[in-house]
Image (cartoon, rainbow, N blue to C red):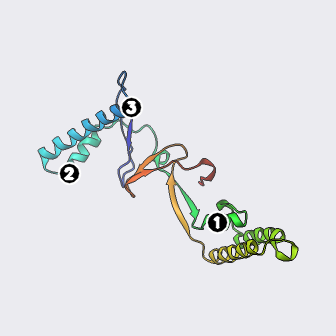
Amino acid sequence: MLDLLPYDMDRIHSFIWVRSMRKKPVEDFCRLSEILGRAWWAEKNRSHRRYLASHHVLSKARAPISKKATVVPMELMVPSVKGAKLILLHLDKHHLSQSKLAACIKEAYRRQAKKYHPDLGGDSDTFRKIHSAYENLMEWSKSPTFVKRSGFPDKWFYSGEVNRWVQPTPISKMTI
């Protein structure tokens, strides 16, 4: 099955190809895409219009089985912070999505400072690294930046916006 959701359209176009005996799924997928490609080129050569060829191929699709919302990938906002700073303070990236960000960072810093402060028998180099990580994260918390990541919890998908295949997004990190 090949589902297409063309840009700026609300309808999902589904092309279904019956699996062949003793063939790999990729061979059947290639055959389906070859048939659709030939239909597109035949109409393009006949009408000399690319948009008409696209409409011709999309008209061969079956009626949509699911709604658009079920095939649009969810978006995940990932903090753009280096992991080493988080490791030093024993924080995860999901801690940085909280509403009380500064308080969370301070609490993590205090926990680590109690362990590694030189006056309490800790290592001074490690404490300097922890303090530096704390200062950097507090500076980041004043104007946090995030990276958008789209994806499905269990499927690879091809994103036309970035022109590449996108990995499945971990289920535990998905936000709705």
Name the residue: 54% across, 43% down.
154
Q: Which residue is disc 2 drawn over? A: 50
Could you say which is closer to the camera, residue 48 or residue 89? 89
Secondary structure of the residue carrying numbered label 1: helix
Name the residue: 51% across, 62% down.
148
Q: Is residue 17 above or below residue 175?
A: above
Name the residue: 72% across, 72% down.
130
Residue 48 in percent (x, y) is at 13, 50
**Which circle, 1 or 2, is nearer the viewer?**
1
**Which circle, 3 or 1, is nearer the viewer?**
1
Question: Viewed as shown, does residue 99 lie left or right of 168?
Answer: right
Q: Which of marks 3 and 2 precedes in the sequence? A: 3
- Numbered label attached to residue 84: 1
Quadrant of the rendering where the N terminus is positioned: top left
Disc 1 crowd rating (10 Å Cα; few below 14, some 14-19, many 20+) is few
Secondary structure of the residue carrying numbered label 2: helix
Q: CA distance from mark 3 to mark 1?
A: 42 Å
